Amino acid sequence: MIKDHQTAVLEVDRLVTEFPTPKGTIRAVNDVSFQLHQGETLALVGESGCGKSVTALSIMGLLAHPGRISSGTIRYGKDDLLGYSTSQMRKIRGNKISMIFQEPMTSLNPVFRIKDQMMEVILEHQDLSSKAAFDRAVELLGMVGIPSPEKRIMDFPHHLSGGMRQRVMIAMALTSPDPGILIADEPTTALDVTIQAQILQLIRKLQEKNGMSLLLITHDMGVVAKMADRVAVMYAGKKIEEADVIECFENPCHPYTRGLLNSIPSNKKYKGANRLEAIQGFVPNLLELGKGCPFTNRCTVAMDICQAAFPSQAQIIEGHHVCCHAVNPTDADKGGRP
Amino acid sequence: MIKYITKRLILLIPTLFGVVTIVFFMMSLAPGDPARLALGAHATPEAVEAMRHELGLDRPLHIQYLNYLKQVAVFDFGKSIKTGEPVLYELLSRFPATIELSVVSIIISTILGILAGIISATRQNSMIDFGAMFAALVGVSMPVFWLALILIMVFSVGLNLFPTGGRINIRLFMDPLTQFYLLDAIVYIFREGDFSYFLSALKHIILPAVALATIPLAVIARVTRSSMLEVVRQDYIRTARAKGLSERTVIYKHALRNALLPVITIIGIEFGYNLAGAVLTEEIFSWPGIGRWLYSAVTARDIPAVQGGVILIAVVFVLVNLAVDIFYAYINPKIRY
Amino acid sequence: MPFNPENTLWYDHWLQLKQNRSALLGLAIIGAFVVVAFLAPVLATHDPLVQNVSLRLSKPFENGYLLGSDDFGRDIFSRILYGARISLVIGAIAIGISLTVGTALGLISGFYGGTLDVLIMGLVDVMLAFPYILLAIVIVSILGPSLNNAMIAIGIVGIPRFARIIRAQVLAEKENDYVMVERSLGTSDLELMMVSILPNCMAPIIVQVTLGYAGAILSSAALSFLGLGTQPPTPEWGLMLASAKQFVASAWWVVTFPGVAILLSVLGFNLFGDGLRDILDPRLKD
């Protein structure tokens, strides 16, 4: 499944993103590393508040005040994006790395026509005439499956349904002739189930067509199963497991990953799931994290050492890494179930 | 849109009816006999009685009311006792001065207010923000008549930069074209190459316009700030940033366009207040507008003038507010009828 | 359970208020204003009405006049202190009128609805069709210029705002279950309104009273300035400015200090009212 192993288009290394608050500093992203390869789909999975969206915003350089990246690197091609100036970063955003968001209903500016919002990003990054930009916008809208795009382009966002708006968002993200990376933050969560499938299919189709890489952020393991080549699971700001998608579903090693898979209805891929199970307990307060593994309080196989130290990363097979004291590295060759 | 405007205009009728009714009965309570006032203290009782009959004052109140309604329906607001001119004419002839002053002051307050609001919002909780918002609250708390006196004291008397009152140097006589002196003076620039008219009109309008701009400026700044803070939290602002647009485009195009919607309503309301008689400012700067005219009618107990004047001013005020609502509906693409 | 003030909602609000520096500044100004009003006879260095024509238009600190003297040789400092009394009273009475009449109208309108509601709200709409100060001027011109009539006029002009706020609150409260329960228990309308509904409207009323006080002080000064309010020789701030225009070239202190007093006291109420609104009723924010 992993396409073109050699070229990582995006490499996040030991990223730490913090939010200072009056009650203390929150580490929303804590020492997270991963690579996104040419043409592949990496799913960043976890519950809300686990830091997956903050990771995406860190990559885009769009952290809301007072968030800041306190250490780590985000390598795009050869360059570290964190060293980029504001204007360099602007040339990347919406051009080389684009992002679509969870809420299509509120992600488009209500006072501008689709035309203006589309053309704006085209004219920002490409040296085209207005006429050419308009034609390109119509073409893109057609490409994302909007019927009679030459008419719809004159609409205001509130004329369109949620699904249509998300299609517009996707079209707006793909204006570049060579879109490198698309970051999709829960792109279908706010949509009806039937529309969800259409949008996911559309994203896949476009990805196959122009070979872009996709960083898909979701909490929905069903979406992961449909879309992803590789999966990285995050919990309380930490990446706790990463694997090829089939490996992840067949041989999940972290108790949290298994919990996530158990919570999907009718998950046929994962043999252990006879019935639907919810993970007990709550995500810990990010202000009250100790030195140990943040999952300890909800973990069914927690040990004393889990309170004391965060586990180092163990390799199960090539490309499958996990951070859990319960996974005995020596068992790894045998399939590594704790 | 037409339907919406029609509906709003129809809803206006009961309000205007109420305005006329209230003003009529309030003024009928006013002490003093208009007939006696019209004729002066030395008139004979017979003459006063004849006058009362002519004015319809000897009839029962409800008949007077119905007669007044009939008159008002055809825009007849009676005659001023002091001048004998029709009230409508008196008021309309002073309206351009008020409009000119209101427009200049609302331009000043809109530009500065929006700018201050944006600066405050983009630097939320900074010293600049705190200072600007404190200044805005001082502006809201300002007794405008006192500010006018201070402006005259400092800039007219102290620094001798501006005249203390009036619309233009009385030695400069202009043909009345539009009655908006600034516009008329621009015509003089082109026609005669003479800048002195324009400079004089400009110098005369600055102090009253600044005084009148204070409260709207403060209100606009406060509303712009809170509206901007609300808007920059919205998802579409994040989208605009994700598109790689410059911060300037994000703030001044994407955020401002949305944030201005409530601000426009406020600008309209404040403009309505100015237009409807900036009594104090006009009085202090001897600005010959409707506020000053109404005030002199009040002090002279010129009842028909006050009655008609108040009704007309209330109508202007209501119409301006209606126009603001319609304009708001027009520019807000989310509102469709 | 024993009553513990720390458990009440108002204690919570007080804690929030203590965090709000500008509201505290406002409270301090209001406090100073009230103290000055009450202690004016003690603090004043002169009788505010005594004229001394030979010492007219003395500069500040000259001839024992702290803030100078006016064109009749009266002490401006003492007149300002006594002016605080007038402003305090005008504000209290005007707001009292607006509050009682406005609350009554709003309660009736919201509680009974129907024709009464249409009539009352129609009247309120018509009153709001007049610009604030214009309506006050017209009312005073009918009643005749005096301190009392100015208070009445300002009070009347303030009615619509209270009526609207109360009505909106009542409409919201009426839907609550406790009103249904009390009604089914046979509580009389009046009791229901006064004992159950009104106390729940306190937050917006308090905010409006504070901000309205600022407006009342400003309006009464404006009316007096126009000669339509307080009459000479009463030491009223707006009235002190009425004759000041002729001194803009010669005696800046006559022009400056009464205005500063108006500005400061109005600012105090606005600062405090703004802070209260943020705490008590965030919905009212513009």
Image: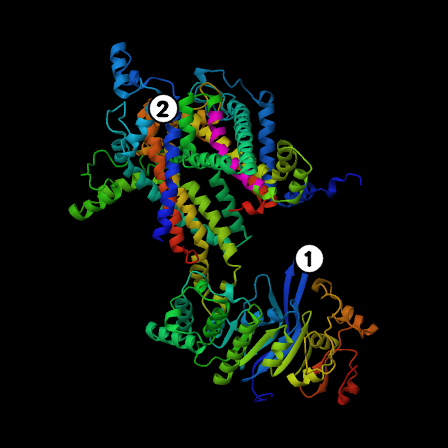
Task: Name the main secondary structure of what is drawn in magenta.
Answer: helix
Query: Which portion, as a residue range, is magenta?
Result: C150-170
Please tell me which residue lies in front, B299 or A62: B299
Indicate the secondary structure of the residue bearing disc 2.
helix
Count numbered badges in the picture: 2
Residue occupying the far left of the picture: B192
Residue B225: percent from left, percent from top: 49, 51
Indicate the secondary structure of the residue bearing disc 1.
loop
Please tell me which residue lies in front, B21 or A135: B21
Please tell me which residue lies in front, B191 or C270: C270
Q: Which quadrant of the structure image shows residue B73?
A: top left
The residue at the point 41 percent across, 28 percent down is: C137
* Residue B292 on the magenta span: no
* Residue C168 on the magenta span: yes
Same chain letter for marks 2 and 1: no
The numbered mark at residue A180 is: none
Q: Which quadrant of the structure image shows residue A185?
A: bottom right
Amino acid under disc 2: His
Q: From the image, tell me which residue sits under label 1.
A: A23
Amino acid under disc 1: Lys
Q: From the image, tell me which residue sits under label 2.
A: B62
Residue occupying the far right of the picture: A304
- Check the image and report above or below for B234 versus A31: above
Which of label 2 and label 1 is nearer to you?
2
Q: Mark 2 lies on which chain?
A: B
